[in-house]
Structure formats: C-alpha cells, structure tokens
Amino acid sequence: MHQHLGKLVLDLTMLVWITGVSGAGKTYLANKLVKKLRNKSILAVHFDGDELRNCLKLESPKDFRKTKRLAIARKYARLGKLLSDQGHLVIFSTISLFNEIQDWNRKNNPKYVEIFLNVPKQKIINRDQKQLVSRYFEKSQNNIVGMDVIAQMPINPDFIYQDVKPEDEDYLTNFIIYKHTEKINENGMGLYKSC
C-alpha cells in the first residue's frame, strides 16, 4: 500500500494484457481502466506498446518484420512480469499477437488477465485512428498487423470484445479487483479458473 495525495492507495500484483490489431482500441481501453481503478484508489502502471517502443527506440515502424515484432513482444512480457513481481498492477496495451507470448504470460504470471479486442476489419478501416490503414492502401506503409501481417490470435483469452462499451469497462475494472482479492486455498492456487 502507498500513501498518495492523502489517501491510502492499494497496489495489486497482476498483469493485464490488452491485445488486438492496430486501431482496435487497446490504448483507449487501458486508459479507461487506469482511470476507473484510480477512482477506486488502486494504482496501475500502464505501458502502451507504441509509446514504449518509441521511448526505448526499439524499432522504426517501417521495419516491423515478424522476428523483430516477436523480440519486442518478449521484452514487453518480461517487463510486465518484472513489475508485477514487485507488487504492481501492470496494464499493457500492445499488439504482440503471438501465441508464444500469450502462453509465456500465462505460465509466468500467477495473476494474469488477457483481453482480446477482436474488432471487425471493416470497423478498423473506418476508424483509421493512426492513419495506418490509409497509408497502407496508399502503399506508403506496410507490415501492419491485421492488414498484410497475419496475427496469431489468442487461443484462450479471458475476455473477447468486438466493441467495448462503458458497462464492459466497469465489469473489467471490477473483475481485476475481484481477481486480485480472491482468497487463496491451501495449495496456493486461486479459486478462479486457472489461467
């Protein structure tokens, strides 16, 4: 627990992995969850894949080959575990659509929540939030997951959404809190579905 602005603030040891193709709304959802958790006096550390990649100067967007994407996703997964092992609630919003990464996260994080935003392709094209889609169709951008790069969709995510509504955000916030506060049985296993 931490003292924050005169209020007691809880730390939740957990990794929440929000994944989906570019433009699915991962960062938007993560920001909403961080705000809703903060309103309940729970601090969360949010890492956005694009921001983290830019901050660490990992790769340029024109060089997003599968091997480099996978290497970056491995770094994100390890960073998430490192911080959650230190007692933090970590929320990642990242494409990182590799079954290897999803499996690694599940095996290495006792409290792990995977949220897959499976937004229909036409909706992604209509949104074109980062102008990646329009640049793809203009042939000035390639290597876009969901367009010319085939993704490995999560096999067993905890949640799948085509469109996240405010009531879904509330439900996810409460689920994260619930998953953290569940009682542990004598074997050290949570009483929730094994993840």
Image (spheres, grey):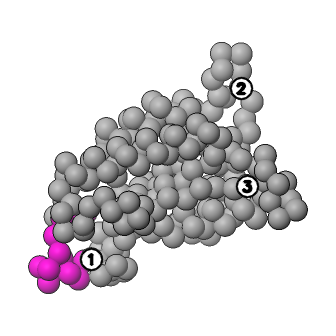
The picture places residue 88, in percent across and down from the top left corner, at: 63, 46
Specify the farthest residue to the left: 139
Instruction: Looking at the image, tell me whether mark 1 or mark 3 is earlier in sequence order.
Output: 3
Type of residue at label 1? Answer: Leu
Q: Secondary structure at mark 1?
A: helix
Q: Is residue 117 visible?
A: no
Residue, disc 2:
184
Highlighted range, magenta: 133-147
Give the residue drawn at x 30%, y 82%: 131
Quote the CA–CA distance across marks 2 and 3.
Answer: 21 Å
Is disc 1 in contact with disc 2, using a CB cutoff of under 8 Å?
no
Residue, disc 1:
132
- The quadrant where residue 105 appears: top left
Type of residue at label 2? Answer: Ile
Specify the farthest residue to the right: 6
Residue, disc 3:
42
